[in-house]
Image (cartoon, grey):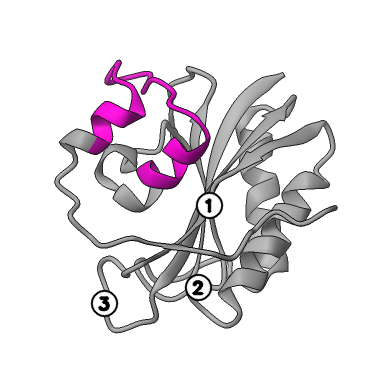
Amino acid sequence: MSNVFIGLGSNIGNRLQHLRSALHLIHRLESTTLVAVSSLYETPPLGFTEQESFYNAVCQIDTTLDPLALLHELKSIERTLGRPEKYERWRPRPIDLDILLYDALVVQNDAVSIPHPELPNRKFVLVPLLDIANPVHPVLKKPMSELLAETTDRSDLRQLPERLLEVF
């Protein structure tokens, strides 16, 4: 089994329900176990700022799916939850699922980049990731807590009281 961290985000419609639905579908993936889910955070949008704030979280899974098969499954979940296959970067979306880390693998190709290339620069991913683990970045060789201390991202995150994890 491989240990994987996935970033989740939503800023259209019922953001909380979109994230819960995504977690439910991740939980149901064959050969995959949902291990942990972070707290829920509300964060300002990046890039195109004239849109609703995001709800963000991170989940940890154990899976036998290889990185490309997992990416395919996550893209399928995004489409199921209403995200168009092609969309303009930085635009609103009902769900965004990103593979952040996959064991200590480093994969760089046209389909997937692991670790996620923006991971060290995104406080809205580092903070929820640290809720559940403090893995070492496989390229930078630094724990996530150190990357958070070094990030130049000064955006405000607000931890929300709602719980994402429901009984499946």
Looking at the rendered structure, the kind of residue marked 1 is: Ser
Front tag of 1 and 3 = 1
Front tag of 1 and 2 = 1
Residue on which the image places disc 3: 49
158 sits to left or right of 142: right
Quarter holding residue 89: bottom left
Using a 10 Å C-alpha cutoff, classify the residue at mark 2 as few (fewer than 14 neighbours), some (14 to 19) or many (20 or more). Answer: many
Residue on which the image places disc 1: 39
Residue in view at x 20 percent, y 35 percent: 149
Sooner in the amino-acid sequence: mark 1 or mark 3: 1
CA gap between label 2 and label 3 equals 13 Å
Using a 10 Å C-alpha cutoff, classify the residue at mark 1 as few (fewer than 14 neighbours), some (14 to 19) or many (20 or more). Answer: many
Compared with residue 104, is residue 6 higher up or lower down, i.e. above or below? below
The stretch of residues the image draws in magenta is 126-148
Q: Residue 63: x and y, percent?
A: 72, 28
Secondary element at image label 2: loop
Residue on which the image places disc 2: 93
Looking at the rendered structure, the kind of residue marked 3 is: Thr
Sooner in the amino-acid sequence: mark 1 or mark 2: 1
Secondary element at image label 3: loop
CA gap between label 1 and label 3 equals 24 Å
Q: Residue 23: x and y, percent?
A: 70, 53
In the drawing, what numbered circle is on residue 75? none
Residue 141 inside the magenta-drawn segment:
yes
Please tell me which residue lies in front, 29 or 24: 24
